[in-house]
């Protein structure tokens, strides 16, 4: 047992453990959403186990992160992820990246072990999808107005396939959470 002391506090360290980073890594590319919905999504995605959250300026995003307003919004996302990670007792806190363009999202999809775009008219359900045991699973969640046809085509060219969550269309703030739950269960990380 090690002991750490200061003039006011003594802390006894009684144990230490090592927690490997989760595999596969789950990355959610979250389109910007209006109001507090995006922060709600960041909070719950962190609680369920997402490893990285990528804010994305989609063509149909109503919210815009320009100048100081964008810096404040990004800081709120990061603070929300940090606090939710502490609350849920995660060993690894999720990374919240800088604001990302569609071109940068394509690069992430090309490098991923599995690239998924959530789309309400996709013929294939997300449930039952085989998740690779390692690497990165990158999921794109569109804005309130949906992913544009041009963006969808660009993502498919980058190697991602479109999947639907079910028969109902979810809000952008809940779609990433639902997809995360499906994929984390399928990957065995929720085993």
Image (spheres, rainbow, N blue to C red):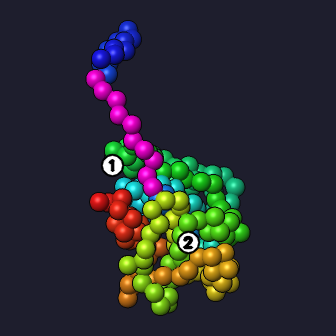
- Label ID, residue 115: 2
| Residue at image mark 1 | 88
Q: Which residues are magenta?
A: 14-23
Q: Residue at x 53, y 61 (%)?
A: 136
Residue 20 belongs to the span the image colors magenta: yes
Determine whether the residue tagged by mark 1 lies in a helix, strand or loop. Answer: loop
Picture quadrant where residue 157 is located: bottom right
Picture coordinates of residue 143, whole percent (x, y) = 54, 75
- Label ID, residue 44: none
132 is higher (above) or lower (below) than 7: below
Residue 55 belongs to the span the image colors magenta: no
142 is higher (above) or lower (below) than 28: below
For the residues marked 2 and 1, what is the alpha-carbon distance in whole angstroms? 27 Å
Q: Residue at x 30, y 27 (%)?
A: 15
59 is higher (above) or lower (below) than 42: below
Crowd class of label 2 (few under 14; some 14 to 19; many from 20; radius 10 Å): many
Crowd class of label 1 (few under 14; some 14 to 19; many from 20; radius 10 Å): some
Determine whether the residue tagged by mark 2 lies in a helix, strand or loop. Answer: strand
Q: Is residue 6 left or right of residue 117?
A: left
- Residue 152 in sight: yes
Q: Is residue 16 left or right of residue 146?
A: left
Instruction: Work out whether residue 137 or residue 70 is closer to the camera in this orientation and state it.
Output: 137
**Residue lying farthest top?**
7
Closest to the camera, between mark 2 and mark 1, is 2
Picture coordinates of residue 110, whole percent (x, y) = 65, 69
Which quadrant holds the N terminus? top left
């Amino acid at each position: 047992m090690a002991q750490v002391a200061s003039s006011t506090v003594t802390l006894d360290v009684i144990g230490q453990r090592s927690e490997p980073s989760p595999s596969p890594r789950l990355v959610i590319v979250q389109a910007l959403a209006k109001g507090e919905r995006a922060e709600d999504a960041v909070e719950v995605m962190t609680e369920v186990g997402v490893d990285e959250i990528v804010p994305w300026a989609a063509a149909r995003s109503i919210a815009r992160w320009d100048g100081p307003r964008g810096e404040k919004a990004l800081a709120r996302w990061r603070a929300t992820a940090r606090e939710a990670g502490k609350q849920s007792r995660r060993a690894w806190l999720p990374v919240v990246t800088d604001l990302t363009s569609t071109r940068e999202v394509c690069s992430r999809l090309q490098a991923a072990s599995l690239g998924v775009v959530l789309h309400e008219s996709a013929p294939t359900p997300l449930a039952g999808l085989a998740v690779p045991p390692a690497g990165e699973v990158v999921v794109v969640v569109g804005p309130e107005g949906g992913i544009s046809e041009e963006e969808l085509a660009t993502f498919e060219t980058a190697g991602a396939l479109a999947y639907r969550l079910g028969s109902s269309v979810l809000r952008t703030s809940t779609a990433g959470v639902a997809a995360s739950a499906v994929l984390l269960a399928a990957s065995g990380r929720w085993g």
